[in-house]
């Protein structure tokens, strides 16, 4: 077995990150690229554990949820550790790569521009 470590930065805070990690752990159970025979996940507070058996090989690890990043430490078979680490990095990076939500304005909304006139120092429309 070989150890691996993944660190993913985020700006969601602990609560937001925890909900995404819950989704990640649930998705891990149904990962289409891996034939997962048995999986177990446990999330308590800001620390989680996961383990699964993939084609007879055991993969397990610990997830730490911190205010500004996620840390995943685990171990996998020596020959597959690179693939497992890469898969976890890719999935978590996609999961935490969220754009801030911006409300869309109705089509009938007309933008009004405001500016300050240099000559008069007044707010103009």
Image: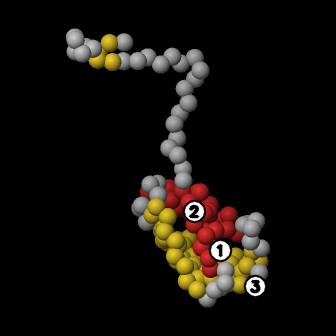
Q: Earlier in the sequence, mark 3 or mark 2?
A: 3
Q: Quadrant of the N terminus?
A: bottom right
Q: CA distance from mark 1 to mark 3?
A: 16 Å
The dot on residue 117 is: none
Q: Residue furthest bottom?
A: 1
Quarter residue 107 falls in: top right
**Which residue ends up furthest to the left in the rendered image?**
120
Give neighbour class at mark 1: few <14, some 14-19, many 20+ (Cα, 10 Å).
few
The answer to whether residue 77 is left or right of residue 121 is right
Query: What is the x, y in percent for residue 36?
Result: 75, 74
Spatial distance from mark 3 to mark 2, Cα to Cα?
24 Å
Residue 6 vs residue 51, the one in the foreground: 6
Identify residue for label 2: 92
Which quadrant holds the C terminus? top left
Q: Residues within 10 Å of mark 2 (few under 14, many from 20)?
A: many
- Residue 11 quadrant: bottom left
Kindly state the secondary structure of the residue where label 2 is placed.
helix
Mark toward the start of the polypeptide (2 vs 1): 1
The residue that mark 1 highlights is 83
Q: Nearer the viewer, mark 2 or mark 1?
A: 1
For image coordinates 77% across by 81% down, the residue present is 55
Picture coordinates of residue 84, whole percent (x, y)? 64, 74
The percent position of residue 18, horizontal first and vertical second, equals 52, 62
At 51% across and 16% down in the image, what residue appears? 110
Which mark identifies residue 56? 3
The x and y percentages for residue 45 are: 49, 68
The quadrant in which residue 62 appears is bottom right
Tell me if residue 107 comes above or below residue 91 in the rendering.
Answer: above
Please report whichever mark, 1 or 3, sits nearer to the chain's N-terminal start: 3
């Amino acid at each position: 077995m070989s150890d691996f470590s993944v660190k993913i930065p985020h700006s969601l805070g602990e609560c937001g990150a925890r909900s995404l990690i819950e989704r990640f752990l649930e998705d891990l159970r149904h990962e289409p690229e891996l034939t997962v025979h048995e999986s177990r996940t446990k999330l308590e507070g800001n620390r989680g554990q996961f383990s699964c058996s993939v084609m007879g090989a055991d993969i397990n690890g610990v997830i730490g949820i911190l205010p500004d990043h996620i840390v995943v430490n685990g171990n996998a078979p020596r020959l597959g550790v690179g693939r497992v680490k890469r898969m976890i990095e890719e999935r978590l990076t996609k999961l935490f790569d969220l754009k801030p939500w911006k409300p869309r304005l109705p089509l009938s909304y007309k933008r009004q521009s405001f500016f300050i006139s240099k000559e008069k120092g007044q707010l103009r429309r």
